[in-house]
């Protein structure tokens, strides 16, 4: 897969929590959990489930930091 995003974090899906329209997909990336909110349709298209290898792909012009 070739993509333009520079931040590709490979890991394993630990949980998929389905909502009414969107799902939260939790990916363990080296001990850190990344959570992505994606459509239920995308979860179905990718056949995502716990235990799957997956990538969190982050492309953004803004990064917010809070303390």
Image (tube, rainbow, N blue to C red):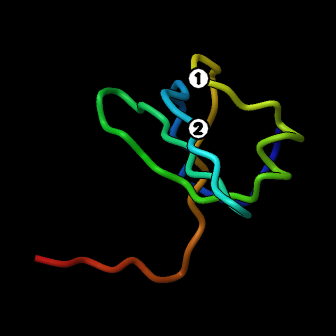
Q: x and y percent of residue 65 in the render?
A: 24, 77
Q: x and y percent of residue 62 in the render?
A: 46, 83
Q: Is residue 60 above or below residue 16?
A: below
Q: Is residue 52 above or below residue 43?
A: above
Residue at coordinates 81% horizontally, 30% vertically from top-left?
Answer: 47
Residue at coordinates 29% horizontally, 28% vertically from top-left?
Answer: 31
Residue at coordinates 67% horizontally, 26% vertically from top-left?
Answer: 49
Q: x and y percent of residue 41 in the render?
A: 85, 52
User: Mark 2 = which residue?
Assistant: 16
Could you say which is closer to the camera, residue 49 or residue 3? 49
State the CA–CA distance, disc 2 to disc 1: 7 Å
- On screen, residue 52 versus residue 7, left or right, reads right
Local secondary structure at mark 2:
strand
User: Mark 1 = which residue?
Assistant: 50
Name the quadrant of the N terminus: top right
For label 2, the crowd category at 10 Å Cα-Cα, with few meaning under 14, some 14 to 19 and many 20 or more, is some
- On screen, residue 24 versus residue 34, left or right, reads right
Q: Earlier in the sequence, mark 2 or mark 1?
A: 2
Residue at coordinates 84% horizontally, 40% vertically from top-left?
Answer: 44
> Quadrant of the rendered structure where residue 19 is?
bottom right
The reply to whether the C-beta atoms of the residues labelled 2 and 1 are less than 8 Å apart is: yes
Q: Is residue 62 above or below residue 1?
A: below
For the image, the number of numbered tags is 2
In the orientation shown, which residue stands out farthest toward the front?
20
Where residue 12 is drawn, which disc sits there? none
Name the quadrant of the C terminus: bottom left
């Amino acid at each position: 897969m070739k993509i333009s995003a520079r931040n590709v974090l490979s890991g394993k899906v630990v949980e998929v929590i389905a909502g009414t329209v969107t799902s939260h997909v939790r990916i363990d990336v080296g001990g850190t959990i990344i959570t992505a909110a994606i459509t239920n349709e995308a979860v179905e298209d990718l056949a995502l489930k716990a235990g799957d290898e997956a990538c969190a792909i982050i492309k953004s012009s803004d990064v917010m930091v809070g303390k």
